[in-house]
Every structure is written in structure tokens, then in C-alpha cells.
Image: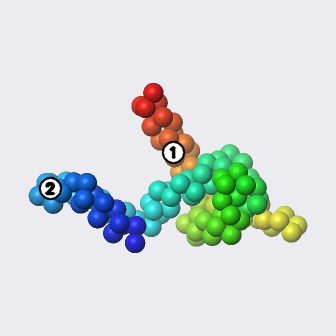
Amino acid sequence: MFSDTYVRWYEIEHPYSKHDSYSVPEITEIDEAFLNPKTAKILICLTGSTSYASEISTTVDCTYSHTVRILDKLEEYGLVEREKDGRKVNCSLTDDGQERAEALVNFLEVGGESQQ
């Protein structure tokens, strides 16, 4: 779904690109997750720490149910792991998730520097 939307946006913004040698890169499902602002905020929130879904939802200003859906998807991708802690579930990044989250933070810091 997102890939089609991105391609349509790109074609509107670059109407002559169909004749150029540049082609729109294929966006994978995991790329879509990183392009979602709430997902990115959740990854950054978990960078170097562990947290409960309720705390994450408050921090990133997202409903609890939406936060849990995003965490489910990130766990499916192998980026987040959850561990039961009594009645609560503690969420943390896997090594792969930590690496990607740090890369995201670095990317955002570079973007912020270029706009100053």
C-alpha cells in the first residue's frame, strides 16, 4: 500500500522521471515501519532502555492499543523482544533493533544539523 502511494507521489513530484535513468527504489515492509513517525519514536524511546507499553504510549503520544500493534510488528521483524514482569510486559530492543534505532537517531541528528 505505502509503496504504491510513494510511487504515485514520486510520479506527481517528478513527472518526467519515467524517462530518466533513475528508478524509484522498492520499499520493503520493514522500510514502511521506519517511515512511520510513531514507529520511529517508539524505536528511539526504547534505545538503550526497557519500558512498558503504557509508558511508551504516553511518551510518544500514542494510544495504548496502537502502541501494542506497533510493538507486535516490531517483534515480528525481530527488532523488539518482550518479557513478562508480573502483570506487565517489559519491552526492549534486540541487538538488531538497537543497531537500527541508533542508525535512525544518527540519521535524524545529521538531518537536524543540515537544517541549522
The three-letter code of the residue at mark 2 reads Tyr
The reply, left or right, for residue 78 in relation to residue 31 is right
Q: Give the CA separation, mark 2 to mark 1.
A: 33 Å
For the C terminus, the quadrant is top left
Q: Secondary structure at mark 2?
A: loop
Q: Secondary structure at mark 1?
A: helix
The reply, left or right, for residue 9 in relation to residue 112 is left
User: Extreme left residue here?
Assistant: 19
Q: Position of residue 79 (x, y in %)?
A: 59, 60
Q: Position of residue 34 (x, y in %)?
A: 49, 57
The colour scheme used to paint the residues is rainbow
Look at 61% across and 48% down and name the residue there.
44
Look at 73% across and 61% down and name the residue there.
53
Look at 72% across and 48% down and name the residue there.
49
Q: Is residue 81 visible?
A: no
Callout 1: few (<14), some (14-19), or many (20+) C-alpha neighbours within 10 Å?
Answer: few
Quarter-wise, where is residue 77 in the image? bottom right
Q: Which residue is mark 2?
A: 16
For the N terminus, the quadrant is bottom left
The three-letter code of the residue at mark 1 reads Ala
The numbered dot on residue 103 is 1
User: Extreme top residue here?
Assistant: 116
User: Extreme right residue here?
Assistant: 86
